Amino acid sequence: MVNTITIGQYVPAESIIHELDPRTKIGAVTLLIVALFLVNSFTGYGLITGFLGVAILLSGLPVRFVMRSIRPLVIIIIFTFILNIFMTPGKTLLLLGPLQVTDTGLYRGTFMSIRLVLLILATSLLTLTTSPIRLTDGVERILAPFKRVGVPAHELAMMMTIALRFIPTLLEETDRIMKAQMARGADFESGNLVGRAKNLVPLLVPLFISAFRRADELATAMEARCYRGDEGRTKLTQLVVRRVDVVALLATVAFLTGTVIWFRV
Amino acid sequence: MIRVEGLTHVYQTRQGQELKAVDGVDLNIAPGEFVAIIGHNGSGKSTLAKHFNALLTPTSGRVWVAGISTSDAGRLWEIRQKVGMVFQNPDNQIVATTVEEDAAFGPENLGVAPAEIRRRVDEALQAVGMEEYARHAPHLLSGGQKQRVAIAGVLAMRPACIVLDEPTAMLDPVGREEVLGTIKRLNRDEGITVVLITHFMEEAVEAGRVIVMENGRIVMDGKPKEVFSQVRRLKELHLDVPPITELAQSLAREGVPVTPDTLTVEEMVQQLLGN
Amino acid sequence: MAIVVKNLTYTYMKGTPLAATALHDVSFTIEDGEFVGIIGQTGSGKSTLIQHLNALIRPELGRVSVDGVDLGARKVNLRAIREKVGLVFQFPEHQVFEETVAADTAFGPRNLGLSDAAVARRVKDAIAAVGLDYEAVKGRSPYELSGGQLRLIAIAGVLAMQPRVLILDEPTAGLDPRGRDELLEKIRQMYEELGITVILVSHNMEEVARMVKRLIVMHRGRIALDGPVREIFRQAELLREIGLATPQLTQLARRLREKGLKVDETVFTVEEARVEILAALGQNQARRFGNLG
């Protein structure tokens, strides 16, 4: 059960993409997402797909491996596709009882699905090539200028770190509690939806209690190690912007701006 | 190193009753000592230990750490830098997603310069024998390894004293051995003062001084031989007695010439058979 | 009610690069009413093994049968197996979830589909069997209890299934000496009074030795030794290689024997050691007097 959750897990390797500053990568992905919402032609998406493809090739990760990150979200993609096909008004192509498939529906369904796939691929490439530490460091540094207007940059980054640290621990714990309750005759597999939800109580209650206890102990341990927010805090790893980062970011900005201007109807 | 005078700590229970966890304790721990504190659950040993780095402050009485009163709120961080603390559950004290980032957590909080943090992290991981695991994720380590990472995290703050609150309670024998070996080495080679709170008599035997707590008070305090030779008293307190010591005393009663404070197998063999 | 394990092999994450063999060709039989200790280091396979005994893990290769029921069979009734073989995990207090002690203890029997009256009776019996006062604790929140008591309630939650086999994984972990001794004493009472089979899993030799008659020593997914406690202690060399220490007094006896004092090398209690040593010293003395005379 623990090993089924591998969405966007970091894969250590040495490549240009891996070694980019996390801020560059976060910036580039954000721009790409914005571009995906602005561009509204298949040709434009084709270009963006090409751009992303080059990035994937540069990362040195097997293409099929990167594609696998789509798998957990396939249902959502299909759902989006179907919803758009049926729900968009236009010229009817096909009638299925009360439902009708329209030409604009088909167009939009396909378009939306491609948008989702590209979104997932771009963010997965970010998390696959950036270690959690560098990712949180990057987020913290990007948000730092907004601290003055009340954005808790450090706290957000610390929360991300702790979440990433404890996900495997809590997954293990879930497994253990589940087995302990199964040994007392609990059944997590059969029954209808309501019944199943009710059956989860013996799992969720101990899990929450344990999570709270852990949080409490962790807070004490952090206090004992002089943690007092980001006041006067330094960092072991420093982020440095290199020439390759500047080049990568400029190239991304140029390419996406061009695409957006050209293909925005 | 640590001086405690007339320390009393009162908890408020959920039912609103007052509970005296520590009751008038006087104690002096010298620099470089290795002190074990034993006593069963609820004897007040954990509460006492939490006063040593100002996680708790006295209800009445005073605690000084390296000459600083722990009630002096302005010098809290100085105290916590000087006295590091390791807790029972190895999972719930590791903050970061890699071993070296975790070891860096303390010095980062103290505002140490990055290059110096790097040096301290490497040294600390080496001191606990975890340097090979610097880039590993903590959840894949064994219990003993996690506790050594926790110790490294404290060491990187360059403390004068480490307080360990039942660090081996959740470990298997191999893990216990690893942690105890690390503590002993740090005390012997680095001269770090160690306060070890434990249930395990076998670990207390290794200390230079053993303190026994009961009902919030110190009831015994002395060298391991002095404390563990009081077999009957320890049994009254429901604490473990080294079986060798118990055997020595029952043999002595039968007229066999062995001393009643025999602690180890080799001492016993020596006395029974000479060389 | 015999448990028969035959050529059991189990591999975690089979077919991935992380595949690890946790059990390797394990075979043994545990008869009705036995009191068995399973001992081994963390990672020796003992946890994987006991999870096979109540079908939390289904046998992949090899056979496990309880009371003649093959746990690998497709149509095996899992609830019936878990009713027969109760498994108490390490730190069982972490599984407690109900608002009252009685309600939590009732979780198991209720899952068995028993009538309310039958559930109530079992809850009462189980709480009594772990030595707690039913009337005093039934309505209390489990989290108001002390650590030791909470663990007893968690064990009662398994006992309320009225298993014929009770497996306890490191039941004393994290308890203080008093809590540990009390719990071990209660486990012994359960064994004697309920007439059940008990399997005690531990990495603490000293503790297990005092409790059980037979020991199964696991090492790297295999059974390294299996036999009466004293027979196992004769294998001090092998045990040390595996990383399991023999009790201190057994070590003493061995050292004395090496040095020529004729004591039984399998003693492990103070009383046994005293008797053995006195007898051996007496003989030595007699021989010395004999020589003089």
Image: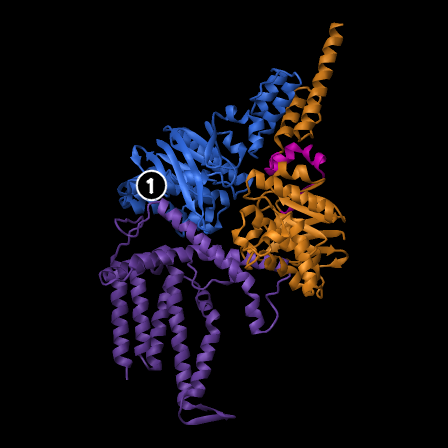
- Residue C90 in view, yes or no: no
Residue A247, position as x, y percentages in the image: 25, 63
Amino acid beneath label 1: Arg
Depth order, front residue of A77/B96: B96
Find chain A in the image and tell me its colour.
Answer: purple
Depth order, front residue of A128/C121: C121
Which image quadrant: the N terminus of chain B? top left
Total marks in image: 1
Q: Residue at x 30, y 32 (%)?
A: B67
Vertical arrangement, residue C259 with respect to residue A107, above or below:
above
Q: Is residue A47 magenta?
A: no
Segment colored magenta? C221-245
Find chain C in the image and tell me its colour.
Answer: orange
Mark 1 element type: helix
Vertical arrangement, residue C122 with respect to residue B189, above or below:
below
Vertical arrangement, residue B173 with respect to residue A231, above or below:
above
Q: Which residue is mark 1?
A: B80
- Residue A127 in view, yes or no: yes
Q: Is residue C255 left or right of residue A232?
A: right
Q: Residue at x 71, y 55 (%)?
A: C64
